[in-house]
Image (cartoon, rainbow, N blue to C red):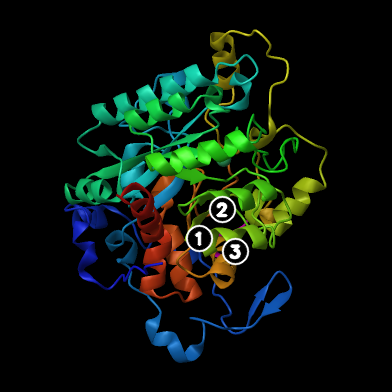
Amino acid sequence: MSEIDSNSKDYDFLPANKSKQLKRREVLKGLSLLPLIDLSPLNYWGQTLLVNNEYSASSSSKYSSDPNLHSNAFVMDGHMHMMSRQLLQGLDIGQRYSDGHVDLPRAIQGGLDAFFFSVYTPEPYYESRHEVKNTFRVVELALDQIEKNHKIIELARTATEIEKINKRGKIAAFLDLEGGFDLDGDLNILRSLYRLGLRSVQLTAHNETNAFIDSCYGKKLWGGLNEHGREVVKEMNRLGILINVAHASDDAILQTVETSQDPILYTHGGFRGIVNNPRCISDECATAIASKGGVMGIQFGSSFNNPKYAAWQASKPKVKSLETSPAKDNQSVSIEEIDQQVAKGLPFVHKEVIPDEYWMGVDQLAKVIDYGVRLVGDDHIALGSDFDGGPPLPRQIKDVSDYPQMTLAMQELGYSEKRIRKIVGLNWLRVIREVTEKN
Ligand SMILES: [Zn+2]
């Protein structure tokens, strides 16, 4: 596994307008909100961990306190929901919205250089088998929206294209699919999507088990991945599409790692060692993914990252959430009717007020990142916010414009510039290069 050296000259691909962006951004605005952290020894959730890396006082000279680090770093997010509002509410990503988490003006403000431009086919489309139609229309809309806003954003299919787009001072959109059900069990659908520019696909049907892979919450029909699932993985390897196992069962993740020739991704989630939820990755699965060079993105929500919040939620009567809302009664329902049903939930943001005692800060997310770094090393941890996918966000982050808070939180934790650069973007870039440029 090649390690990317953040101090090398590799960063001359940074957008030409970065320095201008820096002036516009209030990079330091949240610094005073961040609590001071007791660095030695760390106490996580009542459990004392030994200091074994960059925290030690002797290495304090490596700590990054550079207020311009976020602006100067390559920043890429692993999971941002993009087309649901544009499809169902007729919005344009080039406009600034007063609600939701993402639009291009706010992405620029947040210092994003690239992101997984995730198009989403939610569960209600599956039952009447509208998922392929929905997938193609959101991919088409994504391409159309990117084209309309070409002065700000361009489609990238490889790591080199991401770099070239950044050099032109623009954001790179790396097209990603979440919830395509099983793409009608036809590898030609996958090939067509590849031709359209799609380079990252989640294997499960969002939270549902599909015709070839078990999901984390769904029925365990295949003991992981079945024979067709292995064909899908091999075809994605052949084409050079990144394989995303977020939302998959443990067995499915381990078998995908074993089957795939390429490194695989877990684009957004937390660690089960922190919050005991099947949507959080187990230490065993995380270690397996890392052993083949894969990368895991830390999602920004409390459900997967804040044990206090998770315990509070668990103590309440069950409510239908965005992550667990398969529609079982949609037999023969038209796609237009489903559109109306799905549109009622927009924007996909957490709408409940979180009581202060259960509301985490970005310092908690930094601790989750550190749990991952200690477990698998800093070459395998990245960020996958899940903006506009409904996460209960930390108090310092209302939307993508607050992205610099993540860098600040890692600086407060005592991380070096080199490590922070990997986590905020370079790890995604490295794994994208390995999969899309292997020939
Ligand atoms: Zn998801």
Q: Secondary structure at mark 1?
A: loop
Q: Give the percent coordinates (x, y) of residue 355.
A: 69, 50
Q: Give the numbered dot on residue 292.
A: 1
Q: Which residue is mark 2?
A: 257
Closer to the camera, 19 or 220? 220
Q: Which residue is mark 3?
A: 287
Q: Does residue 166 sit above or below 92 in this rendering?
A: below
Q: Does residue 410 sit above or below 233 in this rendering?
A: below
Label 3 residue near ligand 1, CB within 8 Å: no
Q: Secondary structure at mark 2?
A: helix
Residues drawn in magenta: 360-364
Closer to the camera, 209 or 233? 233
Which circle's residue, 3 or 1, is located before the other in the chain?
A: 3
Closer to the camera, 161 or 49? 161
Which circle's residue, 2 or 3, is located before the other in the chain?
A: 2
Residue at position x 60%, y 68% in the image: 371
Q: Give the numbered dot on residue 205.
A: none
Report whether residue 1 is seen: yes
Q: CA distance from mark 1 to mark 2?
A: 7 Å
Residue at position x 74%, y 73% in the image: 46
Q: Give the percent coordinates (x, y) of residue 141.
A: 36, 23
User: What secondary structure prevails in the magenta region?
Assistant: helix
Could you tell me the amino acid type at mark 1? Answer: Lys
Q: Give the percent coordinates (x, y) of residue 274.
A: 68, 61
